[in-house]
Each structure stands twice: as C-alpha cells, then as structure tokens.
Image (tube, coloured by chain):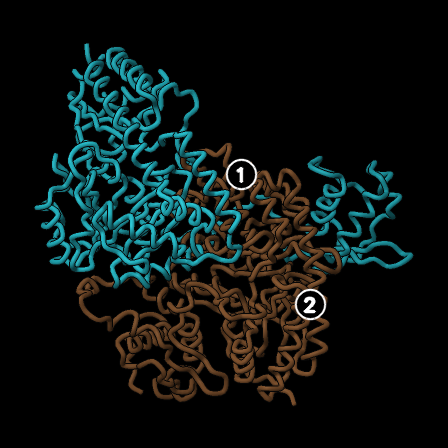
Chain colours: A cyan, B brown
Amino acid sequence: MYIELDGQGPRYAQLIRALKAMILDGRLPAGARLPASRTLAREIDVSRNTVLAAYEQLQAEGFLLGRVGSGSYVAEIGSRAVSTRKAPFAALAAPLSPFARRAVAITDGSRIPGRQHAGLRYNLQYGVPLTNPALASAWRRELNRAAERAEFDYPDAQGLPLLRERICDYLARRRGVEAAPEDVLVVSGTQQAFALAARVLLDDGATVALEDPHYRGARQIFAAHGALVRGVRVDAEGLVPAALPARARLAVVTPSHQFPTGALLPLARRVELLAWASRSQAWLIEDDYDGEFRFGGRPLAALKSLDRDGRVLYIGSFSKTLFPALRLGYMVLPPALREAFRAAKWLEDRGSNTLEQAALAQFMAGGGFERHLRRAAQTLRVRRAAMLAGLKKHAGAAFDIVDSNAGMHVAAWLRSRSHADCERLAAHARERGLGLYTVAPYALRASLRPGLLLGYAALPPADIEAAMRLLGRCLRETGIVA
Amino acid sequence: MYIELDGQGPRYAQLIRALKAMILDGRLPAGARLPASRTLAREIDVSRNTVLAAYEQLQAEGFLLGRVGSGSYVAEIGSRAVSTRKAPFAALAAPLSPFARRAVAITDGSRIPGRQHAGLRYNLQYGVPLTNPALASAWRRELNRAAERAEFDYPDAQGLPLLRERICDYLARRRGVEAAPEDVLVVSGTQQAFALAARVLLDDGATVALEDPHYRGARQIFAAHGALVRGVRVDAEGLVPAALPARARLAVVTPSHQFPTGALLPLARRVELLAWASRSQAWLIEDDYDGEFRFGGRPLAALKSLDRDGRVLYIGSFSKTLFPALRLGYMVLPPALREAFRAAKWLEDRGSNTLEQAALAQFMAGGGFERHLRRAAQTLRVRRAAMLAGLKKHAGAAFDIVDSNAGMHVAAWLRSRSHADCERLAAHARERGLGLYTVAPYALRASLRPGLLLGYAALPPADIEAAMRLLGRCLRETGIVA
C-alpha cells in the first residue's frame, strides 16, 4: 500500500493524517482491510508501535473497525459525502455580512497588527506610551496583590463594583462628573466603548457626526456598522457648533482636548452643543481621552458635568493615563442607556478581565494612581517644553504650532499647505529613523490642512531635541524649506 | 386577538414584528397569555407552523416565556425596559437600535451580573470552576514573570504570536487539529467568539441552527443580532443531522461533549454534518468547550480535523480548563474568514489583554498548562464518581442519569417529566442552600425533557455526597418522590 507521509510532526500523527485522507477521499473504501501492523511498519519504515498507535486512534475515532485476529477494516462512514476538493474556498459562497465586508475594507488588513517600531531611532508616533519604570513596578505590585485574592469565577459584566466606586470618586474630584457606580460600565478600552455605542445606538444608515479631524477608530467602527459618517468643522476653539448637521443620531466630541488639534472647547460652545443634541434628539459621546494632563490653567470640567438631559455618554480611558497594553476604560451612561449597554457588554464578552480591574481599583484606592498622574504630568510637561523648543528652533520656518497646554502630543501645521509635501516629509523621516504620523488619516475632508502629530510621551528631552534636529534636516533634504 | 400583519416578507416574520410591536407598546402586557398556536393560526389565516415558528423565535429573544402544557406568556421585560421609563429621559426620543432592544429583552437585566453565591452551602451551578490552590500560585508566578517583561504598547489585535504558536502545538497534539498561527485569533472568551461570528457571518434575518438544548450565550447573541434561531434535535448520540434545517447560514455544534446533555457525536454523524454544511453552504462553529476532560475511552479528534472544505470555525476556551475570570479563548478560522475576523476584533477592542496572553504562552510552553490539565482531570474524575454514586444512592429513583465520561457536569433527567416539578425542586433546593440549574433555560423547545445540570467541579467528594443527600431530601420534601 502506498502511503505518503507529510513529514510534519510525530510519525504516528503523520500516519493518522495520511490514512484519514485516504479514507475520506475514497482511496481506502469502506470494508477495505488494512495491512497488518508489522507489514505496514516495514513498508513505510516506522516502528510497529507507531502503526499500532495510529490504528488504535483511528479505531477510537470510528474510521477503522478492529476485528480480533483478523485485522483492521475501514468503517462505513459515508465518505463520499465529504468533499475532497483541494481549494478550501468553496465556503466563500456563504457570503460575509455587510458589517464584515465593510470592516475588511475599512481596516485595510495590512495595518491591523499595529504600528511598526523596527528601525526607528526616534518614535514620535502618537499613542506610544510614557514608559515609566516606577509605574511598571508599582503596577506589578498591585497585580501581585490582586492575584493573591483573585476571584476565579466569571466577573461582574458591568465591572468590578470596587473599581466602579473608585472611578466615580475620581471623576467627581478631577472631572466634575457626578456619577454613581450603577452609571459606570467598565469596558476593554475606548475602542470597545465606541463599538458598544455603535451597536446600541445606531440603526443601519443612521447619521453620526464626528469632529473633523478625529480619532480614526471611532470613524471605522461607526462606518463598519453602516452609519453615514459626517465630519464637523473644527477651528482653533474646537468643534464649530454651527457646522453640526441638522439631524444626527449621535455626535462624538473631544471638548477637553480636541483630537488631534488640541483645541479646548469653550463653555459657550459646550452649551450650544448640548442644545443641538436636545433639539435634534441626538446622543453625545464625550471622549475625554487625555483630559487628565493639562499644563496651563485649570482644566474645564467635563461636558458630562453640564448634562441635565441625560444625553451625554462619557468615555474615560486608562490607555493614556497608564499604558495601552492595559485594555481597560469606562463609560458613564445616562440612566436611559444603562440597561442596554450592560446587556450589550454581557452579550459581547461577559465582562472585562477581573484581575486587572482589581489591581486598578487598589491602585486608585491607595492613591498610587493619582501620584502616578502627577508624576507623569511633570514628565510630560518637560518633554512638551523640549518638543516645542526643538520644533521652533529646527523646524519653526515650516510649521504653525498649536500650543494646547495639554495631552501627550503637539499638532504642527505645514505652512506650505501641501499634503504631498507632508506625506513626502513623513516618508523621508521614516527612512531616517524618525517615526511620526501625518494628520491626513485622521480626517474625512481632504481639504483639511496638512500637518504632523508629534507625540512626546515616549522620549526623554535630549532625544526629543535630537529628533527635532533630525526633522529640520528632513525638511531641508526634501526641499520643503531651503 | 386582533393582529394586523403588514404584508412585508414572509408571514412568520410579519407575525413576529406584529407581536413585538404589541409587546413593546404595552398592548400585550407582561404576563398576558397568547392564544394557542392552532387558534391563532385559524384567526389570522396562516399555517400553524408559521405561528409555532414565530412563538419559538419570540421565546428565543426573550419576549415570550413558554410553559409546558400551558402555552406562551408575555415576558416581564420589553415594555418596561424600552418604552415606559419615567422622565427626565427626554433623550429616549432618540431610540435604541434594534440590536439594543433585542439585547435588553433577551438578557433580562436582572440576571446579568452573574450567578448568586450568597447563602449557598453547596454550589452545583454549572460553570463554577475547580478552585485549585496549586493552579492559583502557578498562575501568579507566570503573571509575575510576564509583568516583568510586559510590553506597554498596544497588543497585536490577532493575539500574541507566541501564544498563537503554543495554541497550535497544543491543538495538534491533543485535538488533532492542524492549524498555523495565522489561522488563530485570540479572543476575550468564548462569548466574544460567538459575538464576532454573529457580526461577521450573519445578515439580518439569517437562520442559525443550534443544537437544542445548547449554550444559552450563543442563542442570545445570535438572536440579538436579528438571526432566526432554529433548534436542532439532540438524542443520546448528540445532534440529529436529519433534523438540521434545509437552509441555514450557520450551525453551532458541540461534537466532543454535547452541551448540556454530554453526548459524544459519532463519526458517521460528523461526516453527515459536514456534508450538510457543504450542501447548504453553511458555516459550522465547533464549540470544543471542555473536550480536554475525558474520563473513559480515547478522545475523538475535533470535528475541525475533518474539515477539508474550510467550513469549520473552531472555538477553544480557557475558562473551563483554567478559570472563568481569565477572559481568554481562541478561534481557529478557515482561510476565507481570517481577515474579516481579524478586522472585526481590531474594530471591537484592539486585541485582548497582553499580560494574560504572555503569562498563558509561558504557562503552555513550560508544560505547566498540561500538567495542570492532567491534575485537574484526576480531581474531576474523583468528583464525578462521587456525584454519580451520590446521585444514584440518594436520588436515583427520580432521575435518569446520562453518563458522558467527560467534562465538569452530569445531566440528570427527571423521570416525572414535569417541568413544574423540576423548577419547584430547584427553587426548594436553593432555599435549602443547594444551588443548581435546570435544563429548561438552555432549550428553545419547551417540550424538552426536564432535568438538572449538576456541576461537580467546585466541590470536594465529601461535599458532593452531602449535596446529593440534600438533593434526595429536597425530592421528598417537594413530594416528587415518596
């Protein structure tokens, strides 16, 4: 009998695979008798035990029948019913959902696994975190303690009650938001908050208003859910309320620190925004993604603190304040939406990771979290100053800089107003080992002014100065400045 | 009863829409009894099967409750949750999505936060984990090591490459599944695998075939996504292929250990199932939820190992093998679906928790995981024997017991065949401090035989014996046995 082994993994597994294939495609028909183990072992040059183990397994799985003293026979299993086509894609005839087709188109497969660090001397890509050895060891300590008392059963789908309490306390003191633990839903990061909102709030074809430019992950998930995404103009004071569409189901806003321009939305515009929501019966999602880090003036309370009408869904993140690998964030929901979001979260994943929630609750309760925030703010303040100084010195001729007094990045707008220049600059910088993002992918309108997002969280001041010097050189090498 | 059909699409869909509208706006209040299917069929001039299909779907979505022998009643949910909130929720005028309305109705708010342990002397609820001090400390050690080398940046959305490699190695050796790391998607538990599948594979109104009884979380998420959920009969050998609907987009199956009856699907039926999928161009989801724990005979390889056609999506879970609080599981995807699922996961939450993934990869690489599995299997074997012996001794007169030789629970079928008896027994046991689940919530068909799911993972043998003695007493106290 001719049996071809594929050479992958242990011999008995190869033999099992080969025999199954022969049975399933009819080369070994029902009733056929297999060679005695000794014979087959000799023929294909394996040990007899290997053949016996394979026969035994095939018997256990019902492919073979064993008869004492008379060998092994192929069982009647209706082999002809199983397709033996090589091409595994017949299944495609069962099509993907509209969601899936849009999701694939929107996310553009290749970019999914995240940013590429390889070969970068200086990484200014927005979102690269502040790496803080003190935080790392404090966090390990909290995890350890949490693991000692870990619950092993399924979590509370709405989030660990202790953590929700700590979040409420934090929000009341730092963001002016009055919330009770039952208003809070713990989620696996900001992105999940948007995904849940898309499912809970949107009918197919609903209109969603996004500031333009904006956080791309929000646009992608709303578009994948079939929403009609409309951009709303942003100026130096943030979202322009007059530019809001007359009707929308939902608007996503970043009043504390417009992403990515950095603008702080003044109170009058906040009030206009709330009035618009009330008039058009729309929900507002306030993404307070880095409202914690302000370097000048008092922070404005969150928009949510003005919400008398129960229209604002507040989203907070720990990816920015702690680190992105910690997949935890939260929503503060109006009463009318609590139940639906809790149900959606339960249906999605039964609740977020318990251990990290417990560690975070302790970290907040013990004061470690706010100590870390203060320390991080100091570090960021120094890095931001280095960035602004370096940018002015080495690249000041090419850019208008928006000084937002907050966050972890600076937006630098290219004076030449040429998107081609901007992309060319970023590509050249990349080759030179300087990683940075342009604003373009964050915008719907191609007419948006070209610019760079320069993240300063990950590098010490000396590296930032060097990176800015390199940026200046790139500007000259690309001929954007003389 | 006056029901107006809108004439759009199939009759059963019209009837479902009409009944939902009546429930949601209060014309059919909670507790109202619906006409018998035969009566309603005559009144509105449709076939009785149309009415039955509509009732079944409304039951699956949680709008109706079915009581054997006494018809269908409006559940206490929809209207309260959706339409009659108290002020000041003007915002409600911006309605929830159809998904959200179904999600709220299906999950029935009150049960979301998970099971209640309080006041239970003996907890036999299915899914309560094996608590193992050795595992807890081994896991702490791995977490610690992982935290020392933790990446702080965003994870790989598809899952940590090292973990995906270990999963492939494990599957090849233990489940007969050949997979490459690019076929694997790490998810935040089995529930998320179903949720992603619902979004990627289902159009609105698609038919999904579920074994009946089945894992309720799957039914809920598919129904919330607007699928028409059809039950497929299960007998002592598991799913009955002849009972599969002629057309479906998707079938969810548990061939290694039918949930919750425990049946092992024989090879011939596996082949028939694959042939059905091929014929009807349907996807198959194989939920291999506790295939690792078998106490007799050799384990059958997973259905996925027979999948020549690229139609099987394999789901593996660490909630059962390690503990539920660890929100990690994985899917092995056919090539045609890889990209869409990766995009859906990226859009949902950017990827699962890195730290736990790293700890798990090490735990698997160092052999600790399989050592734990062997130890857990020994423990479970002893507990299962105690459960079967105690059940026979103290409650044998009342139940038919299905001995499935696998898993973490036993199904005990009530000889009296009265669902009312069964619910009464469970409620009485609860008061006596004995927590257990009845089979009814896991089934679509109210005609399913009444029974109990008895989980034995969480209790030592002496407690299991005591719990069975208590169950025997409850049987007498409720008059179910003399």
Q: Between B139 and A472, which is closer to the camera in this rendering?
A: B139
B153 sits left or right of B386 in the view: left
A99 sits left or right of B439 in the view: left
In this picture, is A320 found above or below A73? above
The residue drawn where x is 83% and y is 48% is: A52
Q: Are marks 2 and 1 on the same chain?
A: yes
| Visible residue check, residue A219 | yes
Few, some or many residues within 10 Å of mark 2 (<14, 14–19, 20+)? few
Quadrant location of residue B339? top left
Q: Residue furthest top?
A: A482
In the rendered structure, which amino acid carries the disc numbered 2?
Answer: Ala
The residue drawn where x is 42% and y is 72% is: B57
Chain letter for mark 2: B
Q: Which mark is residue B144?
A: 1
Residue at disc 1, secondary structure: helix
Q: Residue furthest right?
A: A69
Q: Which mark is residue B172?
A: none
In the rendered structure, which amino acid carries the disc numbered 1?
Answer: Asn
Q: Which residue is mark 2?
A: B462
